[in-house]
Image (cartoon, helix red, strand yellow):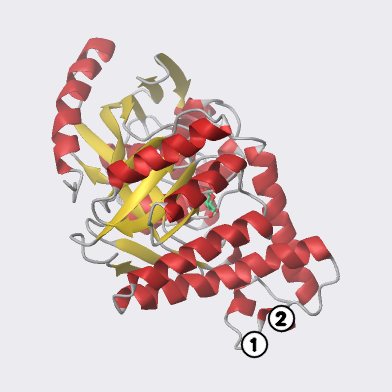
Amino acid sequence: MSRTDDSSRDDAERAAPSRTLFRRIFAAEPEGVWAAPGRVNLIGEHTDYNDGFVMPFALPQSTYVAARRREDGQVRVHSLFADETVEFAVEALRPGAVEGWAGYVAGMIWSLRTAADVGLTLEGSGDGADGGSDAGGAAPVLGGVDLLIDSTVPHGAGLSSSAALECSVGLAVAELHSVSAEPLTLARLAQRAENDFVGMPCGLMDQMISMLGEPARAVLFDTRSLTPRPVAVGDPAEVEVLVVDTRAPHRLVDGEYAARRSQCERAAAQLGVASLRELSDRDEPVEESLAGLDDELLRRRARHVITENRRVLEAVDLLAAGDVASAGERMTASHRSLRDDYEVTVPETDVAVEALLDAGAHGARITGGGFGGCVVALAPAGMLDRVRSAVRERYAAAGFGEPEVFAASPSAGARRVR
Ligand code: GLA
């Protein structure tokens, strides 16, 4: 079984056509091509907005941005998947001003331009000629830009195509306007674009891994201290990560996600802690931590978060000890918790998990925000074909559409391609 240990081959294949198309659409030469990856999360779901632990890795599938700086404060952005060009002025950007796919692009530019408003420091003059910052002396003056967007990240599959778009655009625009920002700062600005411009109250996991992903390593993030720690996911000759894209339509995603988030906040407030993470740090049984919570629904939501944080840390230790089978069991336990306590799975994800386990995977779980999307499994190497047929058979029997099944290996985070 061949494994792509980094995304360099894809980068080389994508950069040249991006440049050619850029020339055709904008009648000018791009100054460079930047890329940022999608992600799959191995374990640690719905923990990031509770100050908890996550363990994602960056996929080889990435979003590519060919870009050129403009001096007139205008942005023109063409997306190959939407087959559409959208234009706006940097100075006119306000939350919600641009909608649809281009909202993520506009939001990222708005977030960079107003970084100082939230105390995020960017180095450099940001010497765009006429960006017109009115946000005070510390804000970078961002000029305009022409952008051509191409992507190999499956869209709407729960693999963070939006974070890949935000981070690739952020890196390109910052570099073109001589603004230097730490990867973690760009990740936080990308999250802010999504929270405050697009209106999706996501945590930091997706943007963080898109900026900080590493070849051949998953990354354990403590979303409270914001410290990343690389983690090897077993010997590639023995273990493989498989992803099932259920292609189940996302249902009620945004509203349900926001509802989960506010349930966690209510549970934390009733238990008198700043975040549910504080409870998973305690050396006491989960039911004891939840004793002060009367509401049965909030108890289940909080129980998921507390037990999930513990499962992440256990999985990290088990992987370090070479016990892949037990790490896999933690993933399966995570799925059951997301199904029964957090209620973010759908029949398609549940059937995929059972099919993967029956086919011999060490463990499997829904990955990402839920309500559709993908399932991730840790499996003995060499099982891809068997797993693909097993999952497809079960799907056919259940009357579901045909899923996509592929092997995934940890790859590089956001980067300049050329
Ligand atoms: C989405 C969000 C992340 C995270 C996951 C659930 O992917 O963007 O911040 O909350 O859901 O773990």
Q: Residues within 10 Å of mark 2 (few under 14, many from 20)?
A: many
Residue 376: x and y in percent read 42, 51
Residue situated in front as seen by the camera: 10 or 18 = 10
Location of the C terminus (image quadrant): top left
Label 1 sits on residue: 284
Considering every residue shown, the one lying at the far right of the view is 294
Which residue is pictured at 39% across the width and 67% down the height? Answer: 220
Residue 22 shown left or right of residue 265 in the figure: left
Asked whether mark 1 lies closer than 8 Å to ligand 1, one says: no
Q: Is residue 262 visible?
A: yes
Which residue is pictured at 37% across the width and 69% down the height? Answer: 325
Contact check, label 1 and label 2, Cβ < 8 Å: yes
Residue situated in front as seen by the camera: 183 or 126 = 183
Which residue is pictured at 18% across the width and 36% down the height? Answer: 11
Q: Residues within 10 Å of mark 1 (few under 14, many from 20)?
A: few
Q: Quadrant of residue 327?
A: bottom left
- Which three-letter amino acid code belongs to the residue tagged 1? Glu
**SS class, disc 2:** helix
